[in-house]
Image (spheres, rainbow, N blue to C red):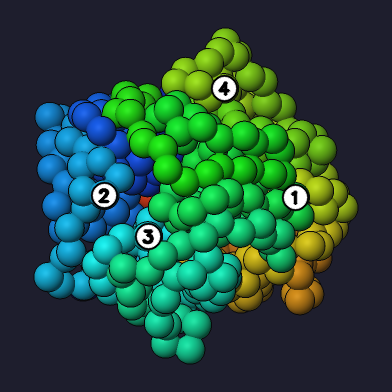
Amino acid sequence: MNRLDWSSSRGKSLRGSVQVPGDKSVSHRALMLAAIAEGTSHIRGFLEGEDTRATAAVLAQLGVRIDTPSAGERVIHGMGLHGLRASSGPLDCGNAGTGMRLLTGLLAGQAFDSRLVGDDSLSKRPMRRVTDPLASMGARIDTRDGLPPLHVHGGQSLGGICYALPVASAQVKSALLLAGLYANGETEVIEPHPTRDYTERMLAAFGWPISFSPGRARISGGHSLRATDVDVPADFSSAAFFLVGASIVPGSELRLPAIGLNPRRTGLLQALRLMGADITIENPRESGGEPVGDILVRHAPLHGVDLPESLVPDMIDEFPVLFIAAAMASGATVIRGAAELRVKESDRIATMATGLRALGVEMAETPDGAIIHGGRLGGGTVQSHLDHRIAMSFAVAGLVADAPVTIHDCRHVATSFPGFLDLANGCGFALQPAA
Ligand code: S3P
């Protein structure tokens, strides 16, 4: 694939309304549960990103018929719990950690073997966090020293376990719950800190008996899923780039309609408010069992904070853009308890540190966080390291940098946010492919 570089320069104030695409986490789960449900499910607001399309393609390889009546819509003809069929070729999850980890749980309980592969970034991401507990359930999964590709052996008899997660991870929790659908007895997952509960909510919506509360979920095998329509809310993690952009560009006033506001996702709202941001939620309501609302964000001077560690799991995907907010805030921002950032699509602490230093920011890395001394951003060249959120975060930096910011290799932005460039330019960014 050709490299795609971007140049981001000072634009105008960010104004108007930006409709960000559907939620990635919800889109992955809706596909998977609908695929093994009885009957036909209709998904609206589906994220047309490369990650979620990769999951749809994997399910099609496993025999599921998926129609696309229009962009953002999928009609899934469910095969029932035991209706998936072996694929003749490897199942390519692309860049998607969520896709690969959740599918591993789903495939561990099938009668047939599967091979899961991913791109260069995904091939470096740790998989033992799912394969070890799945092995205690009776699954047989081969890895390459804990990394993809994964060979999931079929025909294993799974038994439920009670598993206390060593790290807060919705992906691991979800993989175990999906395997638990096929297990004898009860599967219980206990988290060190509550994480996004979309799998639990959606299992309940598809009619599977489940008991869950923040930090704990329990199901037993032997039931079935009933086809259900899913309305996917707009992705808070995609809105995050505009929340920070409008906060740091003077004169901005931006509205982000119908954003998913699940409390396990909105830690960045609290973090930005602690830093002095002016953000209001309008029309709070429920859609498809999820809290949603319109977000209004206006420019406000930001100051550094000692970020409460308890917020970390609720904003785990928003740190790259928080680092940009911190670089523009007066004083120091201290982040701790975020070692998980080192095993995302890139090592997000190291990648952001190198990039911010290239833009003249003083930033110290720690094993589980960073100390960022804010004030101003200069221009320069940064690398995305094949990480969509790093690329978009530095696009936000370019809005306020003294000179243009060139970002190398932005093609992965389409994994989670197709159309970012046009939406961004439509509200005041000056972002273009670099020569
Ligand atoms: C996700 C969980 C988080 C998050 C990822 C999506 C999910 O990962 O970073 O983007 O959909 O379950 P971890 O479970 O590794 O924390």
The amino acid marked with disc number 2 is His
Image quadrant where one finds the C terminus? bottom left
Tag in front: 1 or 4: 1
Report how far apart the C-alphas of labels 3 and 4 lie in the structure.
Answer: 32 Å
Instruction: Indicate if the residue with disc 1 has its beta carbon within 8 Å of ligand 1.
Output: no
Q: Which mark is residue 109?
A: 3
Relative height, residue 166 to residue 24 (above, below): below
Tag in front: 1 or 2: 2
Image quadrant where one finds the N terminus? bottom left
Tag in front: 3 or 4: 3
Q: Nearer the viewer, residue 26 or 300?
A: 26
Q: What residue sits 63% from the left and 50% below the top?
A: 188
Report how far apart the C-alphas of labels 2 and 3 lie in the structure.
Answer: 9 Å
Q: Which mark is residue 193?
A: 1
Residue 261 is situated, as x and y percent measured from the top left of the image, at: 58, 29
SS class, disc 1: loop
Instruction: Indicate if the residue with disc 2 has its beta carbon within 8 Å of ligand 1.
Output: no
Of the numbered discs 1 and 4, the one sitting upstream in the chain is 1
Q: Are marks 1 and 2 in contact (CB under 8 Å)?
A: no
Q: Nearer the viewer, residue 401 or 326?
A: 326
Report how far apart the C-alphas of labels 4 and 2 lie in the structure.
Answer: 33 Å
Q: What residue sits 75% from the left and 50% below the top?
A: 193
Q: Which mark is residue 82?
A: 2
Q: Nearer the viewer, residue 413 or 81?
A: 81
SS class, disc 4: strand
The amino acid marked with disc number 4 is Pro
Of the numbered discs 1 and 2, the one sitting upstream in the chain is 2
Residue occupied by mark 4: 291
Question: In which quadrant of the rendered view does residue 205 lie?
Answer: top left
Q: Which mark is residue 408?
A: none
SS class, disc 3: loop
Q: What residue sits 51% from the left and 32% below the top?
A: 209
